[in-house]
Image: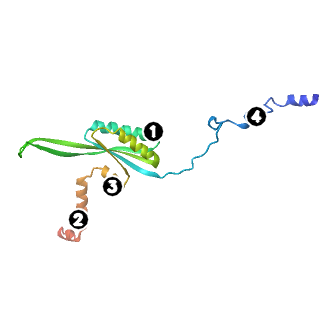
């Protein structure tokens, strides 16, 4: 017995026996009384979705764009980008009653903003649309649609001078034009 106690003294003083709690490992309090059942349901997802906001008042559009961006992040949607599109101006003419005399002219600008979100689960999208429509300011319209290539083209302002020069270059490839210029 003495030899065994001497042997134990020579062993470094580490914990020789672990407790049952240490053997069991850390416990999750949520799993203490009920087992965890993984949710195996799969819902379809939209890859890219454009939320387009249009209105005549610039400040409401800007604030509402920020609101949609924050709500999309709270729903854990991936906000790909958020951008402004060039305003469309329209000239409105008001005539005097029962005449063709112009009473006043007004230039209205329709402002346009787009928030592009990705990886949107279908059940969450219904709640998101209901929330956005419930908080929609007066005079603002919102449109939800899947992203298309035409939306990307609509974003940029065309350079008319560049297009004109490109047409001139294409016309120089025409053999009749080249002959008239004396190049052939």
Q: Disc 1 designates what residue?
A: 74
Q: Residue 11 bears which disc, if any?
A: none
- Residue topped by disc 2: 171
Q: Which label lies toward us, 3 or 2?
A: 3
Compared to 182, does 87 lie above or below? above
Q: Count residues near mark 2 (Cα–Cα under 10 Å), then give few for <14, some for 14-19, many for 20+.
A: few
Q: Picture quarter containing residue 61? A: top left
Residue 120 visible somewhere in the drawing: no
Q: Secondary structure at mark 3?
A: helix
- Distance from Cα at disc 1 to Cα at disc 3: 29 Å
The disc placed on residue 20 is: 4
Marks 4 and 3: in contact by CB < 8 Å?
no
The label nearer to you, 2 versus 1, is 1
Percent x, y for residue 1? 94, 29
Q: Is residue 71 left or right of residue 143?
A: right
Residue bearing the label numbered 3: 150
Residue 16 falls left or right of residue 168: right
Q: Name above or below for residue 93 compared with residue 184.
A: above
Q: Does label 2 or label 4 sit earlier along the sequence?
A: 4
Q: Residues within 10 Å of mark 1 (few under 14, many from 20)?
A: few
* Element type where label 4 sits in the image: helix
Looking at the image, which residue is at 52% across and 51% down? 42
Of tags 2 and 4, the one toward the viewer is 4
Label 2 to label 1, Cα distance in Å? 54 Å
Front one among 132 and 80? 132
Are the residues tagged 1 and 4 within 8 Å (C-beta)? no
Q: Could you say where residue 68 lies in the image, as x and y percent from the top left?
A: 38, 40
């Amino acid at each position: 017995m003495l030899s065994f106690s001497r042997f134990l003294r020579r062993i470094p003083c580490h914990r020789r026996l672990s407790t049952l709690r240490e053997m069991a490992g850390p416990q999750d309090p949520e799993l203490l009384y009920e087992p965890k059942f993984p949710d195996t349901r799969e819902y379809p997802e939209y890859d890219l979705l454009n939320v387009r906001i249009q209105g005549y008042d610039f400040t409401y559009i800007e604030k509402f764009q920020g609101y949609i961006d924050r709500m999309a992040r709270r729903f854990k949607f991936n906000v790909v980008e958020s951008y402004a599109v060039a305003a469309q101006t329209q000239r409105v003419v008001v005539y005097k009653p029962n005449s063709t005399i112009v009473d006043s002219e007004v230039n209205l600008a329709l402002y346009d903003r787009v928030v592009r979100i990705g990886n949107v689960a279908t059940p969450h999208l219904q709640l998101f649309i209901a929330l956005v429509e419930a908080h929609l300011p007066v005079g603002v319209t919102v449109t939800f649609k899947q992203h298309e290539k035409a939306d990307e083209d609509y974003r940029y302002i065309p350079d008319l001078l560049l297009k004109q020069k490109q047409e001139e270059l294409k016309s120089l490839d025409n053999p009749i034009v080249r002959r008239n210029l004396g190049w052939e």
